Image (cartoon, helix red, strand yellow):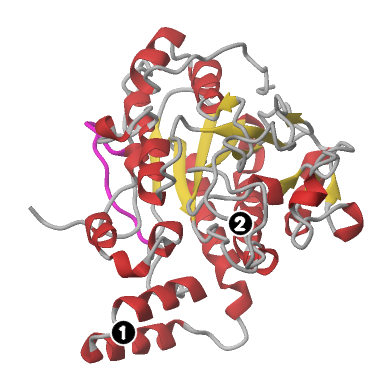
Amino acid sequence: MAQTKRDFLKGALSIGCCAAASPLLTPVTVAATPGENRLVVIILRGAMDGLGVAAPYGDPDYAALRPKIGRDPEGGLIDMDGRFGMHPKLAPLAPLWQAGEVSFAHAVSTPYRDKRSHFDGQDILEAGTAGIASADNGWINRALSHMTGTSIDTAYSVGRENMLITTGPNPARSWAPGAKLPLGEDERALLQMIYAKDPLFAEAAAAAADLSLTSGKRKAQGAKEAEVLAKYAAERLNEQARIAAFSIGGWDTHVAQPAALNRPVIRLASAITTLKDKLGGNWSRTLVVAMTEFGRTARENGSKGTDHGTGGAALLAGGALRGGRIYADWPGLGQNDLYKGRDLTPTEDVRHYPAWALHTMFGIEKSAIVRDVFPGLSMGANRRFIA
């Protein structure tokens, strides 16, 4: 059996968790379904810090947990509701918040607990299951089987493997954004670590990385990549496709988080604004759900970063969203409120949001969702986040 990129990276223990947090190639997948509603799922690889992206500055315990990396509106946060503030690099999304086209679901997580492995966490997120034993196909692929009249247009992925979220019995094909898409700083660092002890490959990798650089455009690379992926997804959604998925990496912020978090946040903002721009009138029938494998520790660490945690946040966007609000059963950040004394306690399953989207926008029966799409999920009360 051919070794997959995921198998290789799992075996490369020396490169730590950065490979899963920021993969070399970013998949994009799309599938055609009946009707006019559209769903875009963005996987945020590397464990996005929900407490940094949608900071609960109004919680009385927040500042003490993050004395060096925490922000408030005076420190640049964009106030949303007097309790939560949006990361300053999400400023392009502030008008969408005001228009009711952006929201956050907070204190959410998958059923994954305690081991905090990027690979396992991402597998569970994309499989939509409660454990890794059955993580061999994805929840979007399973959902397609329950959409009456569905015809698969195409599923696309960048690189040699498809996203797990669309893997399954339905057919898929590949798409790559082209050789002109440059490597980012994290991808360059990963290549250097992989090939450090092999002079031949190290030299070739360095040459390839140098060729990827463009004068004066280094800071724009990440945003450009997200723009390319979102633009391609929007083009397909404007045609036959109704469901699209892609990923944005770089969210693993163990060290110097204030600076490290800027890059993926800029990419995410670029992806959302590009989708809105390129979808045109179809934006009004679109829901975007951006989810991550797990959150990060409530307390900052000694390196001005945060470590792998549990509860986090998901970003919701789109013209089909009833937005401009925080969806959360907020647990608090007091010592007795934290999960195992270290993490934001999850009070809601993040699968709730795509599950209700599939039911509300695509007509999939709730019984099929909890049986086949998200096995074991308790959908709970509908938060009516879809307009």
The residue depicted at 75 percent of the width and 54 percent of the height is 66
Residue 222: give x, y in percent of width and height: 56, 67
Choose top left, top right, bottom left or bottom right for residue 258: bottom right
> Would you say residue 22 is visible in this rendering?
yes
Residue 188: give x, y in percent of width and height: 43, 78
Choose top left, top right, bottom left or bottom right for residue 256: bottom right
> Is 176 located above or below residue 329 in the figure?
below
- Circle on res. 196: 1
* Secondary structure type for disc 2: loop
Crowding near the residue tagged with mark 2, few <14, some 14–19, many ≥20 C-alpha atoms within 10 Å: many
Mark with earlier residue (1, 2)? 1
Taking 136 as reference, is 149 left or right?
A: right
Tell me the kind of residue under disc 2: Thr
The residue depicted at 25 percent of the width and 32 percent of the height is 133
Q: Magenta span covers which residues?
A: 167-176
Crowding near the residue tagged with mark 1, few <14, some 14–19, many ≥20 C-alpha atoms within 10 Å: some
Q: Quadrant of the C terminus?
A: top right
- Circle on res. 186: none
Residue 359: give x, y in percent of width and height: 50, 16
